[in-house]
Image: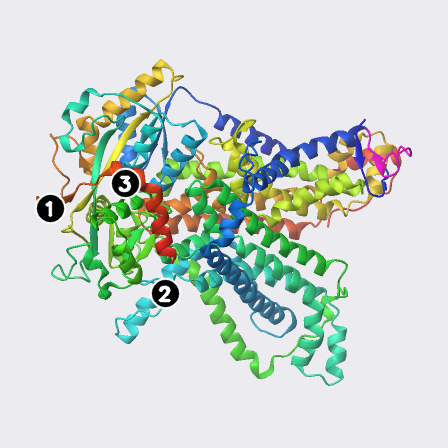
Amino acid sequence: MRKFMVFTLVLFMAGLVFMAETAEKITVYLSGPEEMINALEKEFEAERGDVLDIFLTGCGPLRQKVWAEMEAGKIHADVIWGSDPLIFFVLQENGMLEKYVSPNEKFIKPEYVYEDSDFVIANSRYGVIMYNEELIAESDAPVSFDELTDSKWKDLVGIADINFSSTALAIVSSIWEIYGGNWEFFERMKDNGIMMTRKNSEVPSRIEEGELLLGIAPHDSVLRLQNKAKKEGYKSILAIAWPEEGAISLERPLAIVKNEKRSEGKEKLTHDFVDFMLSRKAQQITVKFGFISVRGDLNAPAGMPADFTVFKVNWKKLADKQLELRDEFKELMLR
Amino acid sequence: MPYIFGSKGKTHLKNSGVNKGITRITGNSSFIFIISALMIVFLIVYPSSILILESFGISKGNFENFGFSSYVSIFKNIHTFNAVKNTLIIGAGTTLFALTLGVFLAFLVCRTDFPLKKYVNWMVFMSFVIPHYILGISWIEMFGRNGYFNRIFVYVTGQNTRPFSAYSVISVVIVLGLHLYPIVFMAVSNAIRKGDHSLEEAASISGATRFKVFRDITLPLIMPTVLSIGLFVFSRSIANFGVSALLLVPIYEETLTTRVFYALNDLDLRGASSVSIVLVSISGLVFLIQYFLTKNKNYSSINSNEKNTNTISLGKLKYPLTVFTVLFLFCGSVLPVVSIFASSFLKRWGLPFTFENLTLKNYTDIFTNPKTFNAFSNSIVYGLIASAMAITASLMIVRMTMRSKSRGVKILSFFSSMPMAIPNTVLAIAAILAWNGPPFELYSTPWILIVTFAALFMPICMKNIAGLMEQIDPKLVEAARISGADGFGAMKDIILPMVFPGIKSALIISLLISLREIPISMMLHSSGTETVGVLLFDMRSNSGSYETTSAIAVIIIALCFLGRLFTEKGKKRRKYGKLSERNMQKIRKHSGAERRQFEY
């Protein structure tokens, strides 16, 4: 028994050491594919050492965490990289963000520049329709969001649940705006047995697995799954239909959290991180994972069409109404 | 000098005799009482009180929003009723399913000439070690739109219809029923084995049919156990979050636990607290019913002479029952494991099982991913520290319970067992409210997970330690005290070695829970404090599919299996702890007490 107690004590002490504070680092809250975040972290730390404390989670939990900390009066992150602009307008209004103009901002395309904002758009993606091309011929594939309400797709269309995903709230709000500010589309989708997933990336996964036939989600995960299939030697059955109402432009903002007590060293690191994220090198990494670069000097990822309609969302307007829209959507789905 | 207020003042410790009803506890005892009371207040009473206050709008001492509005609004909301309805259907359905299956199998194995008893035990054990969330995933792999059963149906019939669906309230009932029936089986088996079967024999001799014997003799004998374990199954199933989230989210159905989670996502802390209190009230009511039903009632008489009992012949039913049981257990226990195991080697779940679609990459990815290693080590380290805290508090409380009947000790004992009736989702909400600001800012640190795990483990540790502590002969401790040992000396040399198997078993069970727990981990983790539960709940989405989760599931099942085997082995080897020869010599030397054989 003595050995056992010594063993437990050693483990206990090891645990305390394990949890002890380490050297000066900045904390970054973000969401996104793990491999991409790892590649970005590796690149940023190559010259600086272990300086990033990354909190990677789904866009829903990220939004919940940031919002909870904002309500409590202190956001524990130094930098936040979100999946859509909805919460960033609220953070800015509450004076939680620090304005920083990166020297790399001059490379950003005008459509991604928000005047008078305390955040910067780091990259983007599009909310699109995706489907199983093995079971749905291209000629039969829906070309608009509206066609998804057809009864032939009953119980076969998926979308991420706004209870779990912040991007889903952004997509749902955008479609609400596309439909002239009413819930008609989702009322019909509910009648058509729309299925929910916990994350956006689950939508193409469920389609590839045969659980769903179609879905609405950001395009980047389809490109990644197609690449995965190619790399591992099996045939991908995923295809994208670019909706004629317009692919929803889902911009991913990056911002420094205001903290007057932050040390000089940490402050410099936060600026370096923003500069890095807007650099050509970092943008190339995100393009490799299917995202759209905000820089004018980089091409779109492979697999994107040359021409398609884009629906430019009025994020400021939706940000002001987001809680109302969230509650209305939930009420509609539970009805 | 501290006092403990007691109802009867009965204690073998010093009684001042001045104030009736007040028991004075001196020296080490008062110190131990204060320490353990502080631990229980910190781990359980404080978070629970904050939760209750928050539900009435009292936050951080601010009474401005005090009122019943959140309760009024949740009871006015039609969707709350739907969530309550689903929760109760899941509770009642799971209990019925698990009881029917568990009692049937226990009777078959313990009382009849069923030929495959050993295999039934193994299959039940297999069901027992599969975490419920993983069972849920295997359910989707089997009955999803492109699940194995639908694929077989399409292949066999040639039709393009898929009759099976994985997502429904009934699916949750079946998955939880399959997860919880082993507990019923084990409890009822024990009751049947210990029952006096001469009554059954007498009834048979008097001409009663087998069914009549079962209905009139066997069933009433095991009824207290069935009721008690049934209520336990009910409370566990209404408290479940993982399976409900997995199988009900896709169809936008809610239970009370998912509603708490959603309210938290919407930062409606007051709403989350009120729904939590509703959930705890249902759970608490169940435990109260259980307490009153089983209090001072034991219908079964003890007859340890198990070998002398006559087994009941199944007659013509023997083979049909065997086929039915084997088929059922194969589907309920073996298939989920086979499905998870097979999927863990696929490049992509949903691909046909051909050689070119198989890979080891899912496993190599897990073992080379630092996040996976971090999650496993976090679960183990947090589990160890939390169980060390819970075991320390339990040792002190159980020891005091045995020495004193004072009201203070009873209250302490009650509060330490209270988390048994609190769903994990609610424990997490209480932790967020209690530790997210002064005076204790544990939010965003590993300690919020550790103290909440410690609260969760308290009843388990209490139960494991109390059982063995009660069997310690008080004379032995007295002998040590007479020999000059102080309270701590007696604890170190006599009590600890004796209850060591209980401590070990509590530690292993706690570690197994920390490896599979989801709601607390999901709601309380932060950067770098992700546990295996977070990995399981999130990984499917991050990697995009079931194949990686299946590989993690295989590792967890293997760990759980090893853990259980380890505890079972420990139980078989010795029922009680042993005193070291050195300690025994000390006692003999000073008191001349008779040597007693402790090792069995």
Q: Disc 3 to disc 2, how far (Cα)?
A: 36 Å
Q: Where is residue A194 in the image (x, y as percent from the top left)?
A: 30, 58
Residue B167 forms part of the magenta stretch: no
Q: Where is residue A272 in the image (x, y as percent from the top left)?
A: 27, 20
Which mark, residue B165? 2
The chain letter for the residue carrying disc 1 is A
Q: Which mark is residue A318?
A: 3
Disc 3 and disc 2 in contact, CB within 8 angstroms: no
Q: In this view, does B332 lie to the left or right of A176?
A: right
Q: Which residue is drawn at 31% across and 59% down?
A: A190
* Chain letter, disc 2 residue: B
Bounds of the magenta segment: B13-26
Visual colour scheme: rainbow
Q: Residue furthest right?
A: B17
Q: Which of A209 and B152 is in front in this view?
A: A209
A282 shown above or below B496: above
Considering the numbered disc 1 on the image, is that residue within a helix, a strand or a loop? loop
Q: Is residue A116 above or below residue B154?
A: above
Q: Do labels 3 and 2 share a chain?
A: no
Question: For the point 49% across and 67% down, which residue is it?
Answer: B329
Quadrant of the rendered image containing residue B301: bottom right
Which quarter of the rendering shows the C terminus of chain A?
bottom left
Q: Do labels 2 and 1 share a chain?
A: no
Q: Is mark 3 on a helix, strand or loop?
A: helix
Label 3 sits on what residue type?
Answer: Leu
